[in-house]
Image (cartoon, rainbow, N blue to C red):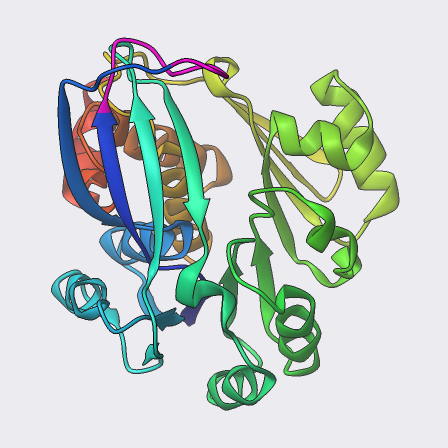
Amino acid sequence: MRILDFGSLNYDYVYGVDHVAVAGETISSYNMEVFCGGKGLNQAIAAARAGAEVYMAGLVGEDGQLLMDICKRNGVDSSCIRKVPGISGHAIIQVDKEGQNSILLYGGSNQQMTREYIDDVLGQFGCGDILLIQNEINLLDYIIDKASENGMRIYLNPSPYNEKIKSCDLSKISVLLINEIEGGQISGERDYDKMLDVMQEKYPETDLMLTLGEKGAVYCCRGKRYRQDIYKVKAVDTTAAGDTFTGYFAALMQEKIPVQEVLAMCAGAAAIAVSRKGAANSIPIRDEVNKFCLHK
């Protein structure tokens, strides 16, 4: 079973700061590093490092060769990625001493998807394949509709949540992967059990994967709820934690592994990722996760 990750590829400009700047404030950073990232790329690498057969689709600018190269180095098929004029998407990321972050996105080439390009990519995939998508590219609603017509199972991480999501037919989504902020925005509820109640009633055919930060995660499938605590580690950079969890989840759910074991491994992978700097390069390989979970 193949996973097609149709999403964003970014350069992340990461600034180390004492605290995240607030409105009107000017602060100095004590270091600056550049990493490859983007929710699409991060999740593709996570799924590949978990052991899945992963294909990446997306657009990079004239400066995007490094983004294509990191796919290849991590076993992600990059044959569907295209270069377009201009610059690639990028993110300005502040990371404080506690490892918490603030992110400013510039879409760049990620916002230049065309229907012709989407049709060409999705024409290579169909029934039995998984589509993993996020909300950092344009024409998301069209991608969902075409993938659904092709019989693909669709895993949607609607981050960042905005007006574009409201134009998408979420009833076509097989698995909705959200955090508690997005869950509140979609459901109108603050309590996570109520969030799941509302969304389960509204989208009865959709499985729900809700991550809750320090409170762990809850997976809702066919009316049953599976809960998972976090593994406590010293956070260095939380940038790729959610993407690591999502990519591992998409990969491991295709294997014959009990759901509770899948969730434990996803939590372990995310814990390892937050203990390291950067986005894509912080994501652990499967053996690391196995060893980490074995000793917890």
**Can you say whether 116 is above or below 89 in the image?**
below
Residue ranking furthest to the right: 201
Rendered image quadrant of residue 147: bottom right
Rendered image quadrant of residue 54: bottom left
**Can you say whether 95 is above or below 25 in the image?**
below
Identity of the residue drawn at 75% across and 17% down? 190
What are the residue bounds of the magenta stretch? 16-25
* Spot occupied by residue 180 in the image (x, y as percentages of width and height): 62, 26
* Spot occupied by residue 140 in the image (x, y as percentages of width and height): 62, 65
Residue 17 magenta-highlighted:
yes
Q: Left or right of 102: which side holds 114?
A: right
**Nearer to the camera, 90 or 203:** 90
Q: Left or right of 46: which side holds 113?
A: right
* Spot occupied by residue 196 in the image (x, y as percentages of width and height): 75, 31
Q: Left or right of 270: which side holds 222?
A: right
**Nearer to the camera, 171 or 60:** 60
Identity of the residue drawn at 20% across and 20% down? 29
Number of marks in picture:
0
Identity of the residue drawn at 60% across and 47% down? 158
Identity of the residue drawn at 70% across and 34% down? 224
Residue 61 magenta-highlighted:
no
* Spot occupied by residue 207 in the image (x, y as percentages of width and height): 67, 47
**Majority secondary structure of magenta residues:** loop
Query: Which quadrant of the figure contains the N terminus?
Result: bottom left
Q: Is residue 79 visible?
A: yes
Q: Is residue 285 visible?
A: no
Query: Which quadrant of the figure contains the C terminus?
Result: top left
**Can you say whether 10 is above or below 57 in the image?**
above
